[in-house]
Image (cartoon, coloured by chain):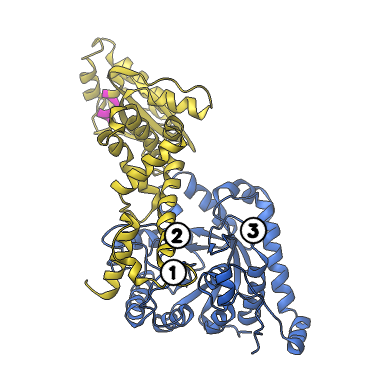
Chain colours: A yellow, B blue
Amino acid sequence: MDTTLNKLQGDFQRYLLTLDGPMAKEVVSDALDAQTRLGIYADAYRLRLLEALQTDFVALRAVLGDDEFDAMGRAYIDAYPSQHYSIRHFGRNLSRFLAETDPYRATPVLAEIARFEWAMTDAFDAQDATVATVADMAAVAPGAWPSLRFGLHPSLQRIELQWNAPPIWKAVDENTDIPEPQQAEYPIGWMLWRNEFKIYFRSLSVDQAWMLDQLLTGATFSEVCEGLTEWIDAQHVAAHAAGLLKQWLEDGLIATIDY
Amino acid sequence: MAAASSLTHPPLGFGLGLRTDHYESILAGPRRVDWFEIISENYMVPGGKPLHFLDRVRAEYPLVMHGVSLSIGSTDPLNRDYLRDLKILAERVQPAWISDHLCWGGVAGKNLHDLLPLPYNRETLEHVAERVQQVQDFLGRRLLLENVSSYLTYKRSEMSEWEFLREVSERADCLILLDVNNIYVSSVNHGFNPIDYLEGIPAARVQQFHLAGHRNLETHIIDTHDEPIVDPVWNLYREAVRRFGPVSTMIERDDNIPPYEELLTELDHARAIAREVLSPDAKAREGRNGCSIAAPSKAGARRGASVAAARLPSE
């Protein structure tokens, strides 16, 4: 649609995004001149989005410091304008931005902190589900076990991190000394989830991460056991898998046990 | 004072914006407000704490839904995802009504998350009225449109905001959420008489009032919703009640959120004003003397100070 209104809105938006273009010509100058009046909107645009980032990335802000966070946030606002109707989603690309943009990409822990904090945001308001219990598992007849599948809680977030983002987050949350960035030898699996209204997170060993990912794809208990023999002795694999399931049931991570 | 209108829903009384900080106080204490307004987008999420508390508050109070993302004046197509999610939320909440703003919020698929003013001319009028009708058809109910605070005037505007709002509401057959603070803020920023604004609004379509605080920077006022309501806005509210009657009133506080009790006290002030204005005694007094109100003139806006207007509502 190419109308006067469309052109005007395009010019206004261009001014807000780039502080450039012909928009000032369209605005009445009186007690305040057009540039000042447009400037009120341009300032508000950035401040509102910065506030959204501050809310969602508390640990990242603590690590960077207020000024550096502000500068980073403004660069992100320019690089990834919001495309969603809700400001709730504005920070979705921050981790990617930090991983791909100088100077932040030289400090990879930053992108991982952002990734971790965004996973928390997603767990916070993910869909609700009732959870299965250990008693439900105990009621399963032995013959039904091989073909069991498990539905995981919709709030579950599975991420891989090579840096110590979760301990950094925890230190900020508890207001203790923030640890120095530390890189692991290989990426470590983490899971985050919501139980009632609290967010939990835990690191996963390689076999745990593999099993959880298998359950997410709908694998049966026997398929999981078979795969786990990569790490676990075949003789103990069923008990090991059942033990993990029990733990995850107690964590409120498993929504359904499907026959 | 307006007669009860066949267009509007029955008034709900005095409400507050539902804010996370107050969930526990609201549910723990006795019923101290008549209704709550939610920011629709805050609850357009799959689950978790927001929807849990929404349902619990809804079980005890009437709710209305107030959106910030409809972007009714944008030249982008209406956002179908947004409308779908809004309708899903409305089915859950069963709100007394749904409102959004007379503004636009972005074009070319971008969202600026602001309530940007529209040029008030025929082209915009036709565009907005048509879109309001589309939204109303989709939602199956009348929409309320709210006047926004603004900081600029377009050279392409051909009419006042109140003329525009009146025309849109009549053409699209929608209702009006009159933000009394926004009228005041814009009156200072643009140098018009807020009484002219009230006089231009069709009383039969006014469903709700907003009250809020702002930040006065001397050269202009920023609509921040982070301070208590100031006297000139209370005075304008008094005048709005006199003109439009017992319209559902709520206080919007979005930042620097005080304890629940503090907002209840502020809401009591609104109740007291409405009671005073609507009591038979007050009407009798008004008949004799009229009532003056602080209204900034153009000169006042230039100096950054409001000036008591000589103009009386009855003039």
- Quadrant assignment, res B18: bottom right
Image position of A30 (left or right of A91): right
Image mark for residue B228: 3
Task: Identify the subunit bearing mark 1.
Answer: B
Residue wearing tag 2? A40
Mark pair 3, 2: CA separation: 22 Å
Q: What stretch is highlighted in magenta?
A: A210-215
Residue wearing tag 1? B152
Task: Identify the subunit bearing mark 3.
Answer: B
The quadrant of the rendering that contains the C terminus of chain B is bottom right
Amino acid type of disc 1?
Answer: Leu
Mark 2 secondary-structure assignment:
helix
Image mark for residue B287: none
Amino acid type of disc 3?
Answer: Pro
Report if residue B138 lies within the magenta region: no
- Quadrant assignment, res B119: bottom left
Q: Where is residue A249 in the image (x, y as percent from the top left)?
A: 41, 28
Task: Please report contact status of discs 2 and 1: CB closer than 8 Å, yes or no.
Answer: yes
Label 2 crowd (10 A; few <14 / some 14-19 / many >=20): some
Task: Identify the subunit bearing mark 2.
Answer: A
Nearest to N terminus: mark 3 or mark 1? 1
Q: Position of residue A229 (x, y in %)?
A: 22, 14
Q: Where is residue B22 in the image (x, y as percent from the top left)?
A: 60, 49
In the rendered image of this protein, does residue B156 appear above or below residue A140?
A: below
Does residue B209 appear anywhere in the picture? no
Residue appearing at x 30%, y 73% in the figure: A5
In the rendered image of this protein, does residue B252 appear above or below residue A252?
A: below
Foreground pick, A245 / A143 = A245
